[in-house]
Amino acid sequence: MHQNDASTLSMGNIFRLIRAALRGDEQDYTSGSIRRSVFLLAIPMILEMGMESVFAVVDLYFVGRLPDSRHNIQTVGLTESVLSLVYALAIGISMAATAMVARRIGEKDPRAAAHAAMQSLWLALAITVVISITGIILAPDILRWMGAEAETIALGTPYTRLMMGGSIVIMLLFLINGIFRGAGDASMAMKSLWIANIANIILCPLLILGWGPFPALGLFGAALATTIGRGIGVCYQVYHLFGGKGIVKLKTADWRPDFSIIGSLLKVATPGTMQFIIGSCSWIFLARLVAETGHSAASAGYQTAIRILIFFLLPAWGMANAAATLVGQNLGAGHPERAESSVNTAALYNTIFMAAVMLFFLAAADVIVGFFTTEADVKRIGVQALRIMSAGYIFYGIGMVMANAFNGAGDTKTPTWINLFGFWLFQIPLAYLLAKTLEMGPPGVFIAIPVAETAITITAWLLFRRGRWKTVAI
């Protein structure tokens, strides 16, 4: 770590750094203070990911105010569990784009970075068309497969159909922000989600509850508000990607498909996507296991707790994204030791943040869950789930940084294997054993989550220390 780090983040400079981070001033992250680099990238990335989590919390708040809220909450939760597969694809492709763009920027070749960015857009569009059509057709079956009750399926099918059909905006929102992050333009990614969330916050009460001249569309209104809000954010992204003054500027020549670059992106994105699909399918299995052993009240309580957990996990993911950008750019610049120091610094900051959140959840779970639901059974399960699952929060934070360090280097295979063993060969069997074999029900599922995440984090840390990720070429 550089000697000027201690003075870099002194109180005299802190506000200037915050302003620079929020403005998105162009920076060279391959030299100078590591702590300063982490700070400048992490602030907008934390705010960006915090904004992504606001979508779910805002929807949950207004949907929870509707009559018969347990079926509405269950629909939102189960649909989000399936949409996590879309998120996995979006994150996998954006991860490849981030790694490739960051590597080219580190090599001081912004035109190659822009060319790679456009090829990632072609890849995402082709995949999303298939997902959207499938989701529209199979919406009621999706809820049925997830263990939803007949009343929930009847009520929730229009919601699920629109959310799955509108997955293009989810994909593009993640991907284009991944391009901005790889270029070190984290401020632009943050602003696009601010705009999307402001639109969603305004539209939710108008469309869900029917404020003013708007009709009360109930649960379907939540899907409409979220899809429109994300769509507005994507329009902002596209404007700046094609016509803005950012580091990555797409030109007409970049529109031509380049199958060699698309192939390279697929090579990184495929294990990266599998990495998140493995985790997402695990969460889907756990959601179904809770629904089977605890029925609608337990499912609604669990989904409420998950939404709250994710709200605080995504800012930590922002810190992990900062580590990924720094790893990619510094490897491109030929500074592997600086890349490793950046990861260690980000992990330390995430540990401090997650420890504070864990203590907050343990102390105030009853108040937090009560803000989102007034049904006694749902609240009781939600409080129990929140307290048990938050016990592993410190390990969640460290694990995210380690996984993104591998991903930023283009080594998406290592965390994929870790997830396969950690989730499918450990977490799921443990959850089934506790919930069904030992007849603990939903609490057994809750316990399995922090236990497995702790084991996954320790494994990732040991493999990171071996340093093979420093030799990956993309």
Image: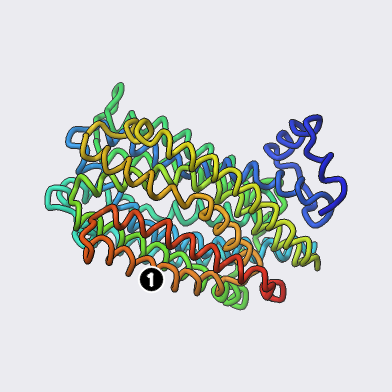
Q: At x 77% / y 33%, what residue is drawn?
A: 16
Q: Is residue 469 above or below residue 10?
A: below
Residue ID for mark 1: 424
Q: Quadrant of residue 46?
A: top right
- Residue 270 visible somewhere in the drawing: no
- Taking the view exactly as shown, the residue that stands out farthest to the left is 150
SS type, badge 1: helix
| Quadrant of the rendering where the N terminus is positioned | bottom right
Task: Pinpoint residue 133: horizontal percent, then vertical percent.
Answer: 32, 62
The amino acid at mark 1 is Trp
Tell me: 85 left or right of 158: right
Q: At x 27% / y 51%, what residue is drawn?
A: 160
Q: Nearer the viewer, residue 129 or 154?
A: 154
Tell me: 293 left or right of 320: left
Task: Pinpoint residue 149: horizontal percent, then vertical percent.
Answer: 14, 52
Task: Pinpoint residue 51: horizontal percent, then vertical percent.
Answer: 51, 40
| Quadrant of the rendering where the C terminus is positioned | bottom right
Q: Nearer the viewer, residue 388 or 471?
A: 388
Q: How is the image coloured?
A: rainbow
Q: Nearer the viewer, residue 323 or 197?
A: 323
Q: At x 70% / y 37%, what residue is drawn?
A: 23
Q: Quadrant of residue 287?
A: bottom left
- Residue 81 visible somewhere in the drawing: yes
Q: Is residue 284 above or below residue 303?
A: below
- Taking the view exactly as shown, the residue that stands out farthest to the front is 438
Task: Pinpoint residue 132: horizontal percent, then vertical percent.
Answer: 35, 60
Label 1 Cα crowd, 10 Å radius (few <14 / some 14-19 / many 20+) = some
